[in-house]
Image (spheres, helix red, strand yellow):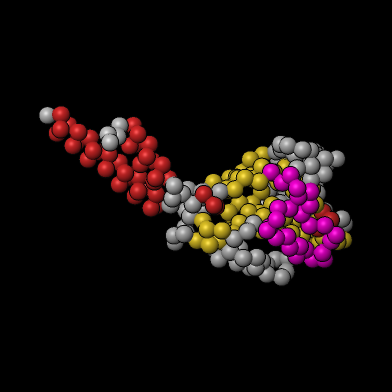
């Protein structure tokens, strides 16, 4: 049975990319609050009455979808004047250099109380963030800080996209991403901390190196097929 060049090329690409680690890819729009398998841990000192919760349309609406389809965190993570540290930890999965996490975030309009959000990564996975407001446990890799100086009007007041890309991993790594709502001098009586939301989260996984090797082998086979076809025609 003869196989056309286009058919063989399509087959080679299909076979190669069938090995992509697509299980690590994720799209989350927070239609139903904190997703199953995610971990919330409020280490604020003193601790307040909220942590991460379903979005509140009375403050602002979601980036997309239903008005409340985002996650929020606010000053009530702490009590009185507090050092806020409220974690949202994604499930452990396998990651590679080049994998990308993107999301949208914002605070309320005309916010007079600065906020701060960190994105961190643990290269061993799990949920170990220590047990104090200043601890980070195994999530020692800081990938992003939104308004780290807690500047007035330093946190975006409309939905803004941020992206981080993993690097420095020593191969396939069982790890986990985490968001940390972290504000010094926060809480209901503090000078900082208001209300933030996150929405439209995506994790984009790059193909494993073996995928490219398979693709190269497939293309080499196609070259051999074309060479034999030319010889036969001659």
Quarter of the image where the C terminus is located = top left
Residue 60: x and y in percent read 80, 39
Q: Is residue 172 visible?
A: yes
Residue most extreme to the front = 1
Quadrant of the rendered structure where residue 136 is? bottom right
For the point 64% across and 57% down, which residue is it?
Answer: 90
* Front-lying residue, 135 or 200: 200
Quarter of the image where the N terminus is located = top left
Q: Is residue 140 visible?
A: no
* Front-lying residue, 81 or 224: 224
Instruction: Indicate whether residue 36 is drawn in magenta.
Output: yes
* Front-lying residue, 94 or 100: 94
Residue 229: x and y in percent read 19, 33
For the point 39% across and 45% down, which residue is it?
Answer: 15
Q: Which residues are magenta?
A: 29-54
Q: Classify residue 7 as left or right of residue 200.
A: left
Instruction: Indicate whether residue 133 is drawn in magenta.
Output: no
Residue 66: x and y in percent read 77, 38
């Amino acid at each position: 049975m003869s196989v056309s060049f286009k058919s063989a090329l399509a087959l080679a690409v299909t076979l190669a990319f069938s090995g992509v680690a697509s299980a690590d890819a994720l799209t989350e729009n927070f239609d139903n609050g904190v997703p199953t398998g995610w971990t919330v841990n409020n280490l604020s000192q003193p601790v307040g009455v909220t942590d991460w919760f379903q979005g509140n349309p009375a403050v602002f609406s979601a980036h997309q979808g239903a008005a409340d389809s985002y996650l929020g965190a606010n000053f009530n993570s702490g009590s009185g004047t507090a050092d806020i540290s409220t974690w949202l930890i994604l499930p452990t999965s396998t990651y590679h250099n080049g994998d990308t996490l993107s999301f949208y975030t914002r605070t309320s309009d005309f916010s007079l109380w600065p906020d701060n959000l960190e994105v961190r990564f643990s290269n061993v996975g799990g949920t170990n963030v220590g047990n104090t407001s200043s601890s980070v446990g195994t999530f020692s890799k800081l990938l992003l800080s939104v308004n780290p100086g807690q500047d007035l009007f330093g946190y975006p007041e409309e939905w803004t996209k941020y992206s981080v890309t993993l690097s420095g991993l020593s191969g396939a790594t069982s790890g986990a991403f985490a968001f940390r709502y972290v504000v010094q001098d926060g809480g209901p009586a503090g000078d900082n901390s208001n209300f933030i939301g996150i929405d439209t989260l995506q994790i984009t996984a790059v193909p494993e190196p073996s995928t490219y090797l398979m693709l190269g082998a497939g293309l080499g086979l196609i070259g051999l097929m074309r060479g034999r076809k030319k010889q036969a025609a001659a």
